[in-house]
Image: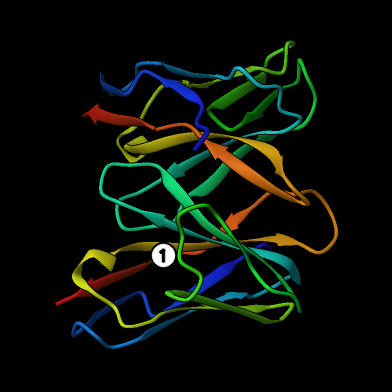
Amino acid sequence: GQQLNQSPQSMFIQEGEDVSMNCTSSSIFNTWLWYKQDPGEGPVLLIALYKAGELTSNGRLTAQFGITRKDSFLNISASIPSDVGIYFCAGLGYAGNNRKLIWGLGTSLAVNP
Amino acid sequence: GAVVSQHPSRVICKSGTSVKIECRSLDFQATTMFWYRQFPKQSLMLMATSNEGSKATYEQGVEKDKFLINHASLTLSTLTVTSAHPEDSSFYICSATRTSGTDTQYFGPGTRLTVL
């Protein structure tokens, strides 16, 4: 099925460093979402973006909805050990009468204390 | 708000048995619920979209007779894996969208199914 291009695939950083990851698509989306998934858990919504160009923050997290509506980035500032996990981007698209999420492959983040 | 629960959190069963997984929206009404499957170190794979009171819409390649979905109320959807086999072992996750508001999906904690 259709997937978003998410990069990097994995990151290993030192505590306190800033992190940046991004997603691109060949299709336009009207909504971009960023989720974090811990091992053995379901994804948790971090930030939702609804307008092209929108820049939204949630604590140390900042995400932007690209002006072309084909990309988005997520930044994490001053990383801490609990930031460890897999981060997924997702675009909300249509499939027939249903709206469904198109997922990136995830960015695995490891933080060295 | 927007809490979604799943039950059970993990289940181990013998090959050939059927397993039912429940997904509940605890503090909101969900017109639409989604069922995903996730293999280790991979992204979520949508299996089906379920609208309350109507038949589920299955993704290509997902057997509807194998994975039975019932969405009988605005707060409950169930996925039944019929005649489970070892290859059905996976992490199954549901999500729900609010009846009113945006289409943001809120996810349950997942169910780990192991078929022996």
Residue placed farthest to the right in the image? B100
- Residue B54 vertical placement versus A23 (above, below): below
- Dot 1: chain letter: B
Q: Residues within 10 Å of mark 1 (few under 14, many from 20)?
A: many
Residue placed farthest to the left in the image? B116
**Image coloring type:** rainbow
Residue placed farthest to the bottom in the image? B17
Q: Could you tell me which secondary element the residue under label 1 belongs to?
A: loop
Q: Quadrant of the C terminus of chain A?
A: top left
Residue A111 in the image: x percent, y percent? Answer: 26, 29
Left-right relation of A10 to A61: left
**Quadrant position of residue A112:** top left
Mark 1 lies on residue: B110
Q: What residue lies at 60% left-to-right and 66% top-to-bottom?
A: B3
Left-right relation of A28 to B41: right
* Badge count: 1
Look at label 1 and name its amino acid.
Gly
Residue B91 in the image: x percent, y percent? Answer: 33, 61
Q: What residue lies at 29% left-to-right and 78% top-to-bottom?
A: B84
Q: What residue lies at 61% left-to-right and 56% top-to-bottom?
A: B106
Left-right relation of A60 to B99: left
Residue placed farthest to the top in the image? A67
- Residue A59 vertical placement versus A71 (above, below): below
- Residue B7 vertical placement versus A1 (above, below): below
**Quadrant position of residue B12:** bottom left
Residue B67 in the image: x percent, y percent? Answer: 45, 73
Q: What residue lies at 45% left-to-right and 54% top-to-bottom?
A: B61
